[in-house]
Amino acid sequence: MQQDSLIAGDALDWLTSTPDFSPADGWVLTYRFISRATAPATKYTATCTTAPDGLQHRLIVASTTTALWTPGSYDWAASVALAGTEHTVDSGTLVIRPNPRTATAMDNRTHARRTLEAIEAQLEGRATSGVSSYQINGRELKYIPLLELVKLQQLYSSMVRQEVAAARVAAGATDPRRVYVRF
């Protein structure tokens, strides 16, 4: 089964079932991972072929290989081939996260958490500075109006609360958004 994310340096092990394209019949399943990075220097493509595992296909990518993968989002596609015939059977996205064992700097905050913290820093800065715009040498800079910042703070606070609740539920704890009532 495919996973959504992987830490660089951890082994990748996916077991895939393709009933119409069984390895017992000779079908070979290949995965291709393509980095979404826009800079050519960080662009990475990997092609990995699975091995038969009974009636399923097993993809194993060694830790030494994934350690070389640049953290970021990768689109992947799985295709089967037999005697010159090919079919795409699945596709998705895999996020490669930095390896905490080797990283020199990491930021595990989600987009919502990072944005909320930036909005709150702006709000705190505004509390001491009443300036909403300024001009230097004919160039003008305007800040986001305070009411819009407050609305954005409420929106991102809600998103962060949802992420926290989902993480708690995934860890087996109760959903903090659920209210229990006893009669």
Image (cartoon, rainbow, N blue to C red):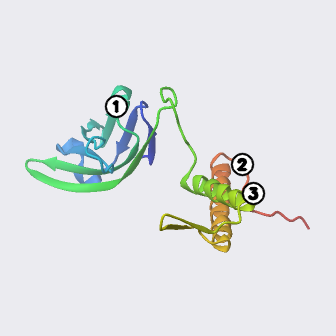
Circle 2 packing at 10 Å, graded few (<14), some (14-19), many (20+), is few
Q: In this orientation, which residue lies closer to the viewer: 1 or 39? A: 39
Give me the disc on residue 87.
none
Which SS class for mark 3?
Answer: loop
**Circle 3: residue type:** Pro
- Find the residue positioned furthest to the right: 183
* Closer mark to the observer between disc 1 and disc 3: 1
The residue singled out by tag 2 in the image is 173
Is 31 positioned to the left or the right of 151 in the image? left
Residue at 91% from the left image edge and 68% from the top image edge = 183
Q: Quadrant of residue 158?
A: bottom right
Of mark 1 and mark 3, the one earlier in the sequence is 1
Q: Position of residue 157 (x, y in %)?
A: 67, 61
Determine crowd level at label 3: few under 14, some 14-19, many 20+ residues with C-alpha closer than 10 A.
few
Name the side, left or right, on which 113 lies relative to 10.
Answer: right
Mark number for residue 176? 3
Q: Secondary structure at mark 2?
A: loop
- Residue 56 position in % (x across, y down): 31, 43
> Residue 117, how many percent across, how many down?
64, 53
- Which residue bears the numbered disc 1? 68
Compared to 101, does 34 lie above or below? Answer: below
